[in-house]
Image: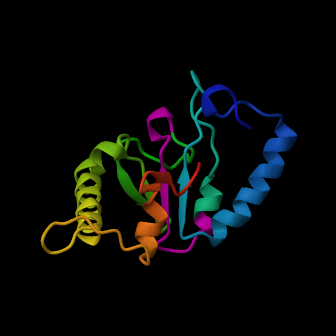
Amino acid sequence: AEGVGGYARPMPQSWLDRQKAEVAKRVAQADIVITTALIPGRPAPVLVSEEMVKSMKPGSVIVDLAAAAGGNCPLTQAGKTVQVHGVTLVGETNLPAQVAADASALYARNVLDFLKLINDKDGKLVVPMDDDIVAACLVAQGGKITKKG
């Protein structure tokens, strides 16, 4: 059910009913549900009903990334994280901005650790080909391409 630009598009009711039944089964088993469906110019489609939320285990989490457009769950409150029926509903409307500092710090730490891996204690570049991480990252060595694509 994907339209232009990766957004959801309206589907026939029979299709929606079949999908709803399948989603309900999965939601009841899930510890976390992340929803992202949006239809340009329209409210977000409801994918997770209140009944589905009630079927979830206490302590489960729903992250509704469509909260700003009304949410994929009718219990979502835009801009808030709330607990309903023992389930945490995350309706924050700009999650990427909230984790930017953490993501940057994690990325910087990963780059530092990688640089330590490919440099010896004197700062000289070494390429330990027996290391799985180095082997996976290496695309060229000695003027030759080691990995294509």
- Of 59 and 51, nearer the camera is 59
Asked if residue 61 is among those painted magenta in the image, a careful observer would answer yes
- Of 117 and 49, nearer the camera is 117
Looking at the image, residue 132 lies above or below residue 140: below
Farthest residue to the top: give it: 41
Residue 106 placement (x, y as % from top left): 27, 60
Read off the magenta span: 54-70
Is residue 35 rendered to the left or right of residue 21?
left
Report if residue 103 is visible in the image: yes
The residue lying at 52 percent from left, 58 percent from top is 146
Q: Image quadrant of residue 128?
A: bottom left
Residue 75 placement (x, y as % from top left): 51, 49
Residue 131 placement (x, y as % from top left): 41, 76
Looking at the image, residue 6 lies above or below residue 73: above
> How many numbered callouts?
0
Is residue 35 rendered to the left or right of residue 134?
right
Asked if residue 60 is among those painted magenta in the image, a careful observer would answer yes
Farthest residue to the front: give it: 142
The residue lying at 12 percent from left, 71 percent from top is 122
Is residue 11 rendered to the left or right of residue 120?
right
Q: How did the renderer colour the structure?
A: rainbow
Farthest residue to the left: give it: 122
Farthest residue to the bottom: give it: 130
Is residue 69 rendered to the left or right of residue 11?
left
The residue lying at 43 percent from left, 51 percent from top is 143
Q: Image quadrant of residue 8?
A: top right
Report if residue 84 is visible in the image: no
Residue 147 placement (x, y as % from top left): 55, 56
- Of 118 and 59, nearer the camera is 118
- Quadrant (top left, top right, bottom left, bottom right) of the N terminus: top right
